[in-house]
Amino acid sequence: MYNQSHAAKGDHYGSSKRHMLYRSLQRAAVNIYKTETSFEMLVFAPGRIKEHFAVNVKGNELVVSYSPPEGFPRFDWVLREYSRGGFVRTFALDETIDTSAITAKYEDGVLQVSLPVIAGAQKTEQEIKVS
């Protein structure tokens, strides 16, 4: 399982550097840890509305996104270090993930996505000697 980030939707500012900075501020941070039976993904997205998240499997990709509601206030920011705007994060899934059993819940500003591993499908570890 690996991460492929997609830029978030956002307003366009004059310079591309400012635009890239603005877009990067809207990217939700993700931590992933492995248990004996699953991968657990924590998407840090405080201040969002649960019903505006979307978690989808498309082929061998997991797509986690958020779209703010219509009429979301746009301020003339003087300083902006945090955004509650939309984002899209895409993660590649391998054949060991049971995509039919993926679950998600949003609590205390964190979207937790549980990706169960198919029993017996876990890949064994192998050390490769470098010569």
Image (cartoon, rainbow, N blue to C red):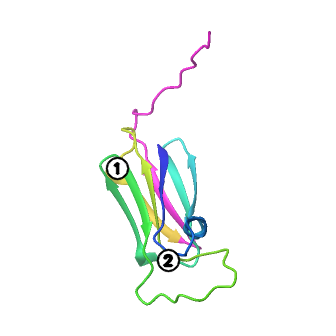
Choose top left, top right, bottom left or bottom right for residue 54. Answer: bottom left
Report the number of numbered marks.
2
Please tell me how crowded label 1 is: few (under 14), some (14-19), or many (20+) other residues with Cα within 10 Å: many
Segment tinted magenta in the rendering: 107-131
Give the vertical position of 125 relative to 40 (above or below): above
Tell me which amino acid carries mark 1.
Thr
Q: Majority secondary structure of the magenta segment?
A: loop
Residue most extreme to the front: 14
Picture coordinates of residue 34, whole percent (x, y): 55, 44
Tell me which amino acid carries mark 2.
Asp
Give the vertical position of 108 relative to 41 (above or below): below
Q: Residue at x 39, y 44 (%)?
A: 97
Q: Residue at x 50, y 70 (%)?
A: 106
Q: Where is mark 2, residue-wise?
A: 11
Left or right of residue 50: residue 17: right
Magenta includes 48? no
Q: Where is mark 1, residue-wise?
A: 99
Picture coordinates of residue 40, whole percent (x, y): 52, 52
- Between the residue at mark 1 and the residue at mark 2, the CA separation in whole angstroms equals 34 Å
Q: Earlier along the polypeptide chain: callout 1 or callout 2?
A: 2
Picture coordinates of residue 120, whole percent (x, y): 40, 32
Under tag 1, what secondary structure?
A: helix
Is 105 in front, or is 15?
15
Please tell me how crowded label 2 is: few (under 14), some (14-19), or many (20+) other residues with Cα within 10 Å: few
Position of the C terminus, as image quadrant, is top right
Give me the disc on residue 117. Answer: none
Viewer-side label of 1, 2: 2
Under tag 2, what secondary structure?
A: loop
Choose top left, top right, bottom left or bottom right for residue 88. Answer: bottom left
Magenta includes 109? yes
Q: Residue at x 60, y 13 (%)?
A: 129
Picture coordinates of residue 50, whole percent (x, y): 46, 76
